[in-house]
Image: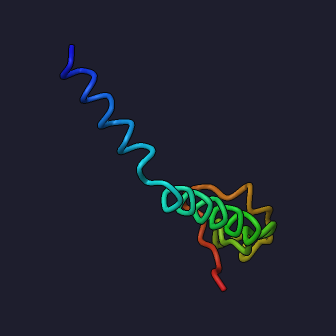
C-alpha cells in the first residue's frame, strides 16, 4: 500500500509541479486558438468544376476536392 501512496504522490507532484509554466502554456494555446478562429474567412474563392469557373462560396461549405485560392 505504501508504494501506491508514493506513486500517487509522485503523479500529483508531476501534475501540479508544472506550476505557473503549465498554466501559461495553456493560456498561450487558448490565445492561439482564439486568434486562428478570428482569422477564419467567411467566404472562399473556389473552383469546383471547369464549367462553373471560379465561385465565391461560404467557407463553411468547403468540401474535400475543392480547389481554393489562398492569399
Can you tell which quarter of the image residue 30 is in?
A: bottom right
Q: As displayed, is residue 53 above or below residue 48?
A: below
Locate the C terminus by quadrant: bottom right
Q: Nearer the viewer, residue 70 or 24?
A: 24
Residue, x 69% and y 71% (percent of image)?
A: 46
The one nearer the camera, 9 or 53, is 9
State the residue in front, 67 or 24. 24
In percent of the image, x 59 and y 71: which residue is there? 67
Name the residue at the top extreme.
1
Say above or below: 17 vs 11. below
Q: Position of residue 40 (x, y in %)?
A: 73, 67
How many marks the image carries: the answer is 0
Kindly indicate the quadrant of the structure image that contains residue 65.
bottom right
Q: How is the image coloured?
A: rainbow
Quadrant in which residue 59 is drawn: bottom right
- Where is residue 66 drawn, in percent x and y? 60, 64
Q: Is residue 44 above or below residue 16?
A: below
The x and y percentages for residue 27 are 62, 60
| Residue 17 horizontal side relative to residue 52, left or right | left
Residue appearing at x 29%, y 37% in the figure: 10
Quick check: 59 left or right of 50? right
Q: Tell me: residue 26, above or below residue 67.
A: above
Q: Which residue lies furthest to the front in this view?
A: 2
Residue at 21%, 13% (x, y): give it. Answer: 1
Amino acid at each position: 500500500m505504501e508504494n501506491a501512496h508514493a506513486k500517487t504522490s509522485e503523479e500529483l507532484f508531476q501534475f501540479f509541479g508544472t506550476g505557473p509554466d503549465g498554466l501559461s502554456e495553456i493560456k498561450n494555446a487558448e490565445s492561439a486558438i482564439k486568434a486562428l478562429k478570428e482569422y477564419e474567412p467567411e467566404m472562399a474563392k473556389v473552383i469546383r468544376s471547369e464549367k462553373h469557373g471560379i465561385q465565391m462560396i461560404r467557407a463553411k461549405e468547403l468540401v474535400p476536392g475543392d480547389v481554393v485560392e489562398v492569399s
